[in-house]
Image: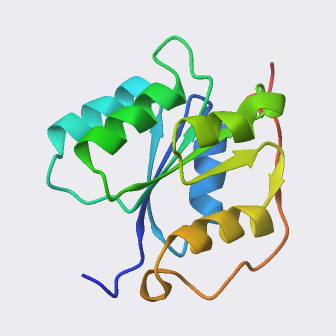
Amino acid sequence: MENLPAAIMVVDDIPSVCELMTELLQDYRVLSLEGTNAALEWFQQNPDTPIDLVISDFDMPPGPNGLTLLSFVQSVCPSTKRVIMSGTVADDLEQMAIDNQLDGFLLKPFTITQLHSVVSGLLPPNRRPKGPKETTFIPRCQLPSGE
C-alpha cells in the first residue's frame, strides 16, 4: 500500500467545489464528501480505513464547521494531515490554522499550483504524483447554474 497514491478526503458543502477538487486531485485517491456531518459519519463507519490528508472547507452550514471536523480527525487519526480552506474568513485563516495546529491552509480562490504545492508538501514522495498539469482557479464560491 505504501506506493499507492495518497488517500485524500475533500469536504465542502458546495457540490461543485467537491467535484472540482476531485478533478484537480485526480492523480490521488480522492473521497469527496458534502458537509461536515457526512465526513464525521464516514470516519465513524470506517475507523480502519486510512486517510492521508483531509482538506476541509471552514464554513459549512448547517453542520459543524471545518475546524470541528479537523479536530475530530486529529483525535481519531493523529497521523492524518489536516488542511483548512476558506474564502469567507480570509484575514484569519492562517492564524486559525496555526492556533489549531493544522498542517496547512488554502485561501480561496487558489490555483492548482497552490493546491498541489500544499498537498505535495504534506505527503511523502512515494505517495504523490509528479506535479500539476495546468493552472485552474478555485473561486470563492461556485453556485449551481440558475442561481
Q: In the picture shown, does residue 93 fall above or below 113?
A: above
Q: Position of residue 98 (x, y in %)?
A: 62, 42
Residue at 62 percent of width and 31 percent of height: 14
Report the coloring of the rendering.
rainbow
Q: In the picture shown, does residue 124 fall above or below 24?
A: below
Number of marks in the image? 0
Q: Position of residue 94 (x, y in %)?
A: 72, 41
Residue at 58 percent of width and 35 percent of height: 99
Q: In the picture shown, does residue 88 fall above or below 97?
A: above
Question: Considering depth in this image, is 36 or 97 the residue closer to the camera?
Answer: 97
Q: In the picture shown, does residue 27 fall above or below 107?
A: below
Location of residue 120 (image quadrant)? bottom right
Residue 75 is left or right of residue 104, and the answer is: left
Q: Is residue 35 visible?
A: no
Question: Considering depth in this image, is 9 or 58 the residue closer to the camera?
Answer: 58
Residue 73 is left or right of residue 63, and the answer is: left
Q: Position of residue 61 (x, y in %)?
A: 56, 14
The residue at the far front in this view is 99
Where's the N terminus, which quadrant?
Answer: bottom left
Where's the C terminus, which quadrant?
Answer: top right
Q: Position of residue 46 (x, y in %)?
A: 18, 46
Residue 73 is left or right of residue 49, and the answer is: right
Q: Is residue 7 visible?
A: yes
Residue at 50 percent of width and 86 percent of height: 125
Residue at 49 percent of width and 73 percent of height: 123
The residue at the far top in this view is 62
